[in-house]
Image: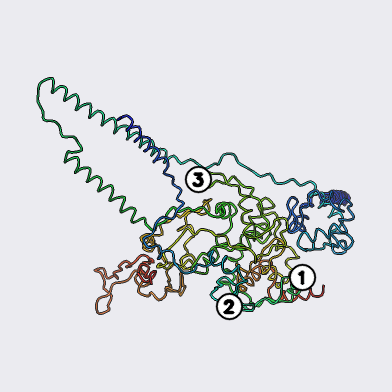
Amino acid sequence: MRKNFIITVMVSAAIMMASCKDVRRSPGRYYMPDMTYSRAYETYAELDTNIFTNKTSDLGEGKIFYNALPVHGTVARGEMPEYPYKNDSLGYAMSATVVNPLPALSADEMKEAERLYLVNCGICHGPKLDGNGPLYNDGNGPYTAAPKNFMIDAMKAMPEGTMFHSVTYGKNAMGSYASQLTTKQRWEIIHYIKSKQGVGAPAAAAKDSTAMAAK
Amino acid sequence: MIPCNSIVKKLSLCTFVFLAFFSLQVSAQDGKQLFQGNCASCHNPFQNGTGPALKGLEDRGPWGDRNNIYAWVHNPVGFMATNKYTQDLKAQYGGTMMTAFPGLKTEEIDAIVSYINEVQPPVATKPTGGGSGTDNSGRNALIFGVISLILAIIALILMQVNSNLKKLSDDKEGILRPEAVPFWKNKIYIAMTIIVLFVVGGFYVVKGAIGMGRQIGYEPEQPIFYSHKVHAGINQINCLYCHGNAWESKHAAIPSTNVCMNCHKNIGEYKGDPLFDADGKEVNGTEQIKKLYAYAGFDPLNPNAWDANKAKSIPWIKIHNLPDHVYFNHSQHIRAGNVQCQTCHGEITAMDEVKQFSELSMGWCINCHRQTKVNFYNIDSTGTETGNKFYSIYEKFRKDLMPDTLKDNGGKYILDKNGKFIIHPSKMDSVTVKDIGGIECQKCHY
């Protein structure tokens, strides 16, 4: 009898110890869950996106569209005017006529533009703008399409407006960066690239666009 | 003069021979460079991208005839008008038209084709082993536990044997002893047990109560096995690429699906080291990318037809939760305060599955605010300003940071007995977050 008892105790202790894993998959308990998890709608919550916005057919009373895009033509406070051209071949051709609306950058702004370049662009186009960022790495990285080398003559001659068009809508394998960078930030980065290429910013851009138009 | 002339002649001959040899070499070995420079943005030899994979192109469509390739590269639109195969390709690739390269010479196109025929797929380096390192501490605890349990049982048995033997010897010698009180009725034993239970139970109750609402170590299973180690560690993507809002706003924010697709439009396969989840199970990286495609509504066979507006959000599970009654601002910490992401989130770049590294309790916040020095404003005698100009309003602290000469009440300098100024050390050696109000209640609760 006693032997059985001892064996049971030992086995159950062993099981308890073995079953203690250090992977914590549950968030645990709260004193006041309704204070911790707010009843307010959370941005991008499933309720919001899947129930409200996907059923655009029943646009009616009592429906709230939190994630709807702003009305076309809306300009947020402090945001620059909208880029006028659409994402098609005509827009791409017309983009050459757009000039960078920002004046030449100050040293501080250039530093910020460099930071933005390194965070958003450098991963593919390379910190040295040579089209060989860590993701491509001479074809050894996971990215299989060669990013554009900004230091070749064709890219040096590319009008700033065309670069803006490509950053805004994406080009070939590259996606759109309009959701990650504001209009101002995109123009700042283009200033940075042009200065790294050694192309003087506003004057050269005007010359480039006429050259493109002549072609 | 004559020997000199001959040397020049020889040299020029040498140069000529060398150049001729070299220029022959150029077109052959530069196939790779030409391919990378002109084609690789849209074409990969082994994988469909913006344009089709090019390996084995001479066996397909009209490309067996080199003249067709020349005509196509020099003028795709003109060639397509007469060729059904390329019209179908255009439809398959979402109506994207190849750029014309009228400047490429026929030898250069030959070099590119021969490069495509020769190139071999990169060999995925798969180092052996590297499986999840088994943690020995858990096993050690188990062994210690079993050993102490066995020792306790032996001690109990020996005590029992001892009392039995004593009873036997007492019986033999005829000593009559009162029947011993069994230990479960012994008041001393009962009192001791109650005290032990109270201490142990109290410890766990307090620990549990403090731990309520705290999630340190929380490591939920996410809808997609997204490895921060692969993205931010091995591939060196900056944290702010996806969580750029941390620089600009209160929230670090979770990237929308189109941000994932910036790269994964092209990267459809995982080729790195084997991945393991926290439970030690192996995870198929390529399957996880397919899950992303399902959310994004992306068809890898027809990449150009993808519409980002139709993508669905991925229901990621938030790990770092602060209660709603606490105000926390990311940009204030990482931009003004220069705090690294890893300070609070741990070595994210080494985590396959992210788990909560910090306690995120109030004591944890306050401790850091007590110890962290701010980038305090200072201006030296030449007018050079250093640090964050916001702090220029804290003039008293700026004075307190300087060593000062002592004055008496009348404003006169006090001199020591040698007639020198008495310099007393500065009152503060640094300004911490606490000094500028970092532990005031209203800073975070309002």
Which structural element holds mark 2? loop
Quadrant for the C terminus of chain B in the image: bottom left
- x, y percentage for residue B302? 73, 58
Residue A76: which numbered mark, if any? Answer: 2
Q: Nearer the viewer, mark 3 or mark 2?
A: 3
- x, y percentage for residue B299? 69, 57
Amino acid type, mark 1? Ser
Instruction: Residue under label 1, please give it.
Output: A89
Between residue B77 and residue B370, name the one nearer to us: B77
Q: Vertically, is B333 above or below B49?
A: below
Q: Vertically, is A161 above or below A132?
A: below
Residue B279: which numbered mark, if any? Answer: 3
Q: Mark 2: few, some, or many residues within 10 Å (few <14, many ≥20)?
A: few
- x, y percentage for residue B164? 20, 26
Identity of the residue furthest to the left in this view: B175
Which structural element holds mark 3? loop
Q: Are marks 3 and 2 in contact (CB under 8 Å)?
A: no
Amino acid type, mark 2? Ala
Q: Identify the subunit bearing mark 3.
A: B
Determine whether, in the image, residue B94 is placed left or right of residue B353: right
Q: Nearer the viewer, mark 3 or mark 1?
A: 3
Q: Identify the subunit bearing mark 1.
A: A
Same-subunit check for callouts 3 and 2:
no
- x, y percentage for residue B37? 75, 58
Amino acid type, mark 3? Asp
Q: Mark 3: few, some, or many residues within 10 Å (few <14, many ≥20)?
A: few
Q: CA distance from mark 3 to mark 2?
A: 46 Å
Upstream in the sequence, badge 1 or badge 2? 2
Q: Identify the subunit bearing mark 2.
A: A
